[in-house]
Image (spheres, rainbow, N blue to C red):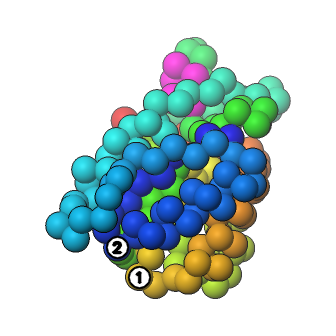
Amino acid sequence: MKIYFAGDHAGFELKKDLMEYVRGLGHEAEDMGPFAYDVDDDYPDFVIPLAKKVASYSPLESLDSRRLGALRRDVGGGMSTTPASEDLGTPFDKGDGDEVRGIICAGSGQGEVMAANRVKGVRAAVYYGGRTDIVKVTREHNNANILSIGARFIGEDDAKAGVKVFLEAPFSADERHVRRLAKIERLVG
């Protein structure tokens, strides 16, 4: 899996540590900045390019026909005549190990996730440590493709635990979750 990393000065050291950790897990890690510690840097300069990179990955669905049917439903419940991939974009992993994800390491993670979620196709979530089951659920139910870590509020061990779950947990592709993601894509446009 390819993982893009970005952040700001507050998450600079954690980003470096997590990139090394992810590589140790056997994934490819690409740094999208900042490339040097600068207390005056601004997270949008790095987070938006990361979000665009993650969103540009457009896998084909590998869902069975029942789940694909759920993709074709429009918000009103009728069936679309266009293929799901044209209808909704592709908010679903291929499931073949060729996924792309993003990890943001910055001060709070909050402004960064707000910025990332402005990019169509991004489903970013914030993690502050502690219970990793929330990371698992955001992957399984929401197919989160970016994890935003509040570096000022989390230790390195908790961050690593959350990242590991984020990279290992699959999207469940349960019909209700597929339907909800499809509605978000359709309603937001």
Judging from the image, what secondary structure is the residue with disc 1 in? helix
Can residue 175 be seen at all in this image of the molecule? no
Amino acid at the residue labelled 1: Arg
98 sits to left or right of 48: right
> What is the tally of numbered marks visible in this picture?
2
42 sits to left or right of 2: left
Q: Position of residue 55 (x, y in %)?
A: 46, 37
Q: Position of residue 70 (x, y in %)?
A: 68, 35
Main SS, magenta residues = helix
Q: Residue at x 45, y 59 (%)?
A: 104
Up/down of 115 relative to 79, above or below: below
Looking at the image, which is closer to me, 68 or 112?
112
Up/down of 111 relative to 24, above or below: below
Q: Are marks 1 and 2 in contact (CB under 8 Å)?
A: yes
Can residue 159 be seen at all in this image of the molecule? yes
Q: Which segment is the magenta one?
A: 85-90
* Residue that numbered label 2 is attached to: 10
Q: As drawn, which residue projects farthest toward the left?
A: 40
Amino acid at the residue labelled 2: Ala
Looking at the image, which is closer to me, 42 or 121?
42
* Residue that numbered label 1 is attached to: 152
- Quadrant containing the C terminus is top left
Q: As drawn, which residue projects farthest toward the front?
A: 36
Judging from the image, what secondary structure is the residue with disc 2 in? helix
Q: Position of residue 25 (x, y in %)?
A: 75, 54
